[in-house]
Amino acid sequence: MFRVIARAQMREGFEAEAMEAAKREQAVHQQLEQGELMTACCFKWERNVFVYYECVNRPLEPEELLLSMAPFLEDWPGHSAPRKWIPMIDVFHFNEPASYEHWLRKETVDRRVGRVAHLKPDMAASYIYFHYQLQEERAFHGPKYEIIAMHENLLFGYQEFPTVVEEPLLPGRLSTTGTPADWNDSRMDLHFQPWEDGHLYFKPIEQLFAYYDESSKKGA
């Protein structure tokens, strides 16, 4: 199992066409029907588009799943060839797939949610430091399917409700005990840029689609 999160930006003036292309995309359905995907979701915030999906056999590129969106997306520089999608870095998860069977949803998922937040640029290293400790020390358990990814200082988070909390099957990668006993001591409130309305932390964003492989007959 491979979890993929990527970010794109819609071309100015073509937002409606990009969103409609995402909602009508058939390649996602084909990969689901072929058993190559377990979950696939797409969200938008302003001109940003985010995809979260779970690949069964190999990591699929976003371009393979959202072919019809390409004409309506900006090119990103940085590689020899222009890119439409930028991989986002997994900076935190409570759990991770140990196997296909482990990752199947056992109960129906009512909501799949995308959310975004901005870190203060000078606090990005601290945010990753605290969260990697928590993640790999298995300091405490949280939602099985939740994940947070980062590109530049933008965070994108994926969640499912109702939440499922399980002890991870895979062992942690750290044998230390550096996570604060009281998580509030990590002062996450100092890590985030406030929104214009003064809100800290994450805000939910618009969902364009959310699919799950129903052929598993195990869940959502």
Image (cartoon, grey):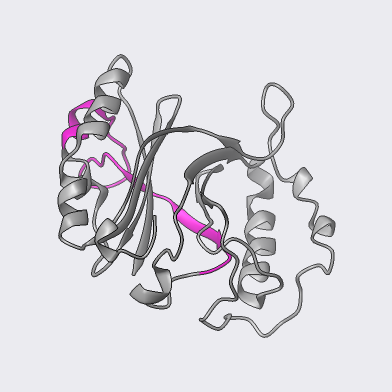
Seen from the viewer's position, the closer of residues 212 and 151 is 212
Residue 130 location, quadrant: bottom right
Residue 125 location, quadrant: bottom right
Residue at 67%, 68% (x, y): give it.
134
The magenta segment: 68-95
Residue 120 location, quadrant: top right
The x and y percentages for residue 201 are: 67, 40
- Give the left or right position of residue 10, taking residue 94 as reference: left
The x and y percentages for residue 64 are: 18, 49
Residue 212's place in the image compared with 84, above or below, is: below
The x and y percentages for residue 119 are: 63, 42
Residue 194's place in the image compared with 39, above or below, is: above
The x and y percentages for residue 104 are: 39, 67
- Give the left or right position of residue 152, taking residue 60 as reference: right
Residue at 75%, 79% (x, y): give it.
177
Residue at 22%, 55% (x, y): give it.
32
Residue at 84%, 58% (x, y): give it.
185
Q: Quadrant of the C terminus?
A: bottom left
Instruction: Tally the marks.
Output: 0
Residue 88 lies within the magenta run: yes
Residue 40 lies within the magenta run: no
- Give the left or right position of residue 121, taking residue 77 as reference: right
Residue 159's place in the image compared with 202, above or below, is: below
